Amino acid sequence: MMKILLPTDGSIYSENAARITKRIGNENTEFIILHVIADKGTGMKSWQKEGADLVLSTIENILVEIGFDISKIKKVVEEGSAPVKIVDVANNYDVDLIIMGNQGKSGLKKILGSVTAKVLEISDRLILVVPPNYSHSNINKISALKEVPQ
């Protein structure tokens, strides 16, 4: 059974990352949806927890809409540094794949996004980065790649 980690920051880029799982996962795939709240040393506020729940539910709803079993979806909220927590959760749940969207900034960060770039730097897990201009029409290309005979 495949385990996929979907870190989300509530952006459309994270939603795009969730949508491509349609052609990567199957009925046995387990998902861990992660939202990381920056650690400001004051603890997690109730409004932050509520916001995190909304962000996680959005991705959960996308996964259910495209056909995945809600019982195979786990929602996780962590507090701390996003890249470090993403890698920690990937290791703790022994995921096979991390799928991340990115929005880009400048230089390497323009290509990957700062959180994505850091995760790629510190993780030894397979990571699929979904570009910001990804078109859902490309899903069929992913399916064709997946179904290539061995």
Image (tube, rainbow, N blue to C red):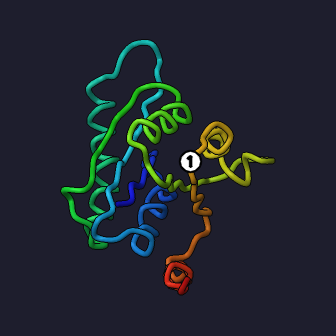
- Residue 86 at x, y percent in the picture: 49, 38
Q: Quadrant of residue 15?
A: bottom left
- Residue 113 at x, y percent in the picture: 65, 47
Position of residue 78 in the picture relative to residue 123 (left or right)? left
Q: Residue furthest left?
A: 71
Q: Residue at x 73, y 54 (%)?
A: 111
The residue closer to the viewer here, 146 or 79, is 146
The residue closer to the viewer here, 28 or 21, is 28
**Quick one: label 1, few (<14), some, or many (20+) residues within 10 Å?**
some
The residue closer to the viewer here, 51 or 77, is 77
- Residue 2 against residue 149 in the figure, above or below: above
Q: Residue furthest right?
A: 107
* Amino acid residing under circle 1: Arg
- Residue 134 against residue 140 in the figure, above or below: above
SS type, badge 1: loop
The residue closer to the viewer here, 72 or 2, is 2
- Residue 140 at x, y percent in the picture: 50, 85
- Residue 76 at x, y percent in the picture: 32, 39
Total label count?
1
Q: Quadrant of the N terminus?
A: bottom left
Q: Residue at x 29, y 56 (%)?
A: 60
Q: Residue furthest top?
A: 41
Residue that numbered label 1 is attached to: 125
Q: Residue furthest front?
A: 150
Q: Residue at x 73, y 51 (%)?
A: 110
Position of residue 141 in the picture relative to residue 118 (left or right)? left
Q: Residue at x 29, y 30 (%)?
A: 47
Q: Quadrant of the C terminus?
A: bottom right
